[in-house]
Image (spheres, rainbow, N blue to C red):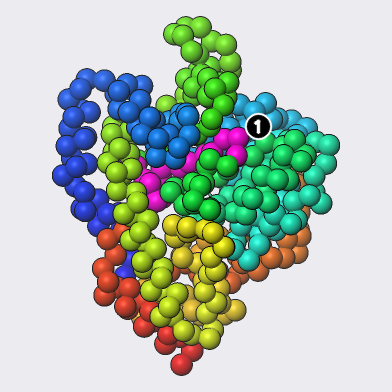
Amino acid sequence: MIEFVSLKRQFDLYSSEYEEAALRTLRSGWYIMGKELETFETQFAQYLGVKYCVGLNSGLDALTLAVRALGIGSGDEVIVPANTYIASVLGITENGATPVFVEPDEYFCLDADKIESVITPRTKAILPVHLYGQPCDMRKICTIAEKHGLYIIEDCAQSHGARLDGKPTGTFGTIGCFSFYPTKPLGALGDSGAVVTNDPVLYDRLRKLRNYGSGTKYINELEGVNSRLDEVQAAMLQVGLKHLDYGNAYRRHIAERYLSEIRSPLIVLPKTRQGAEHVYHIFGVLAENRDALQKHMEECGVKTLIHYPIPPHLQECYARLGHKCGSFPISESYAKTELSLPVYVGMPEEDVDAVIKAANSFGV
Ligand SMILES: *Cc1c(COP(=O)(O)O)cnc(C)c1O
């Protein structure tokens, strides 16, 4: 069986580096908020070319605390793509703010041309998601945000190292939010996340928010949370960051093979935006008869996944928002027709061959 992702294969590529970093940290006697975290934060900020990075517990915490740090809450609206993973929306509603959904463009990203029509006096921010690892149209989104005085909170949970016109995702907006869930382009060996920004005031607020709202021990200026990135994961992330560009190039190579060798007329291949460096966290194709394609791939020994089968506006937890089936037809159609093919670092070339062969034999 060809797995959708093999974390074991990814780990094995660098196992001695991971083991050495883990032992170094275990033997240090210091496990929370120490040198490993400081080093990783500095390295990641440098990699992206931003001033500040704050390590956190998860990508969801990055989104939640970004919204909170900007003072967005009850009565405020945040514009978010309707076809995203639920966490992008939870980061908004966790603060009592209202998500305003916008349909995606043909690249699966927030459609910049549909943003202005939903802006109201209550709109505070735009939350673009660089879904599947492809940058959104940040040129247009930044222009709109500037014109209307809105913050931009970028969800970069799938786009570490992806660039638009040479500029990394996470560096266009007010705050960039990252997840380091193990399967992400930059993954820890456990849960963690981070925010990045160039704003010293937001940096200070985010550092306090993650640690009970405290900058100085036992002095609490803000109502904070506990969302610290621990030393062992920070050490794992230093190893991961060193190999991030290689990993992105590896997945891009597989994606390029799929793009040039999958020729089934029943499969629609993903498109890349002009000027975008896609990192292919997910290689999503579209097929009218998606469920049959998934069954066919399974019969050929290829595991596939759907990202995502139910859009947030149709989830039970958001019934209170009052959206219905048909409210966002493009997102709903992607949910019915999208299928993700395996792409991961360390995926053997012969498995790539087998995926291509399986895809090309669909319906023949
Ligand atoms: C993974 C993911 C998140 C959440 O990250 P966690 O670290 O799992 O909390 C948020 N947004 C998107 C688009 C994601 O893919």
Which residue lies most toward the right here?
121
* x, y percent for residue 306: 51, 64
Instruction: Give the amino acid type for the residue marked by disc 1 in the picture.
Output: Asn
Is residue 91 in sight in this rendering?
no
Give yes or no for residue 224 being in the magenta stretch: no
Q: Which of the 4 image quadrants contains residue 334?
A: bottom right
For label 1, the SS is loop
Q: Is residue 187 left or right of residue 71?
A: left
Which residue sits at x=26%, y=68%? Answer: 348
* x, y percent for residue 308: 55, 60
Q: Is residue 117 left or right of residue 89?
A: right
Q: Residues within 10 Å of mark 1 (few under 14, many from 20)?
A: some
Instruction: Report the residue marked by disc 1.
Output: 95
* x, y percent for residue 213: 53, 17
Q: Which is nearer the eye, 270 or 236? A: 270
Q: Which is nearer the eye, 144 or 30? A: 144
Q: Which residues are magenta?
A: 173-189
